[in-house]
Every structure is written in C-alpha cells, then in structure tokens.
C-alpha cells in the first residue's frame, strides 16, 4: 500500500485535465449536432429530404461517450507526488500499469524549454531515467508540479 493512499493530505495529485479539454469540446460539438438534427424534424413536413430525427441518436450517443471519457480524464490521476515517491499512471489500465518511482531513485530532473517533457535521471551521468510527457497536465499546473519536484529533488 502506498503512502498516497494512507495519507492523502500529504500528496499532490496531477490529473490528465489538459487532455480532457479536447474531449469536452468534442462532446459539446456532438451534442450540438444531435440537437440540430432533432430540431430540424419539425420541418420534415415542408422538406421531406431532411434527416429523420432518429439520426440524432448517433451523435448524442457519441457525445455521451466522449463526455464520460472527458470526465474520467478530469478526475483520474496522471502523476501523484507522495512521501514515498512519484506514482505514474498510464492512460490504459492505470491500476494495473501504475509505476512507483521512489525518491531515492531520482538523482536529478530536467525539463525542456517548453515545459512539455520531464526527465527524471537515475544517475549522475544521466545515462538512465524516465521521460514523462507533461502535455496531459494543464499548462498552469505544470509550474506547480515543477516547483514541487525541484523542491523535493534538490
């Protein structure tokens, strides 16, 4: 059992909310398409070539699936900083593929200029380590993550 589960007040949780934005927008567009298809059904008596209102169910269903995925991305963790180390959760099957990088394994860290890739080095020669994409995390949260990591690694 990790320290993050035992003491949630001592952890920093970073979600995939940066990725969720795309799916929230897609859900809104699909819902608007469904609403438009349903609304045009009142004019079918004037123009029988308009699509049947049942066609609105397809984009509505797609909108619900996309919104559910966006909600999941907004809530689920990508990185959790705990007293033990950094918990990294993959996109697919996060409970099975979770990886814990203990603080003693992290020798130094490096971030690219655009704050999109984080590299955790395991040795002084920087010959081994982990590359993590920071794009799933919202841009305004990346600075908080980097400050917390810099404070812990230093």
Image (cartoon, rainbow, N blue to C red):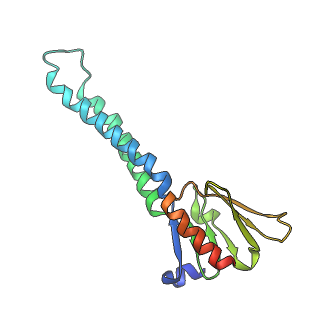
Please report the residue visible at 63 percent of the width from the left and 73 percent of the height from the top. 149
Percent position of residue 140, x then y: 48, 61
Q: In which quarter of the image is the C terminus?
A: bottom right
Q: Report the number of discs.
A: 0
The reply to whether residue 77 is in sight is no
Please report the residue visible at 25 percent of the width from the left and 31 percent of the height from the top. 36
Please report the residue visible at 56 percent of the width from the left and 68 percent of the height from the top. 145
When the figure is inspected, residue 125 is found, relative to residue 23, above or below; the finding is below
The reply to whether residue 118 is in sight is yes
When the figure is inspected, residue 52 is found, relative to residue 94, above or below; the finding is above
| Lateral position of residue 59 relative to residue 2, left or right | left
Percent position of residue 65, x then y: 40, 46
When the figure is inspected, residue 141 is found, relative to residue 154, above or below; the finding is above
Q: Quadrant of the N terminus?
A: bottom right
Corner quadrant of residue 101: bottom right
Percent position of residue 130, x then y: 73, 62
When the figure is inspected, residue 1 is found, relative to residue 119, above or below; the finding is below
Please report the residue visible at 31 percent of the width from the left and 40 percent of the height from the top. 31
Percent position of residue 43, x then y: 15, 22
């Amino acid at each position: 059992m990790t320290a993050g589960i035992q003491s949630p007040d001592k952890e920093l949780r970073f979600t995939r909310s940066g990725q969720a934005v795309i799916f929230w927008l897609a859900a809104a567009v699909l819902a608007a398409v469904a609403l438009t298809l349903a609304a045009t059904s009142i004019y079918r008596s004037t123009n029988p070539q308009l699509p049947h209102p049942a066609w609105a169910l397809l984009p509505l269903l797609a909108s619900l699936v996309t919104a559910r995925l966006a909600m999941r991305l907004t809530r689920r963790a990508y990185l959790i900083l705990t007293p033990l180390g950094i918990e990294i959760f993959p996109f697919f099957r996060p409970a099975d593929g979770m990886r814990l990088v203990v603080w003693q394994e992290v020798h130094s860290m490096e971030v690219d200029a655009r704050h999109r890739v984080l590299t955790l080095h395991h040795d002084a020669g920087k010959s081994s380590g982990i590359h993590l994409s920071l794009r799933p995390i919202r841009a305004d949260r990346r600075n908080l993550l980097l400050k917390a990591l810099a404070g812990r690694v230093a």
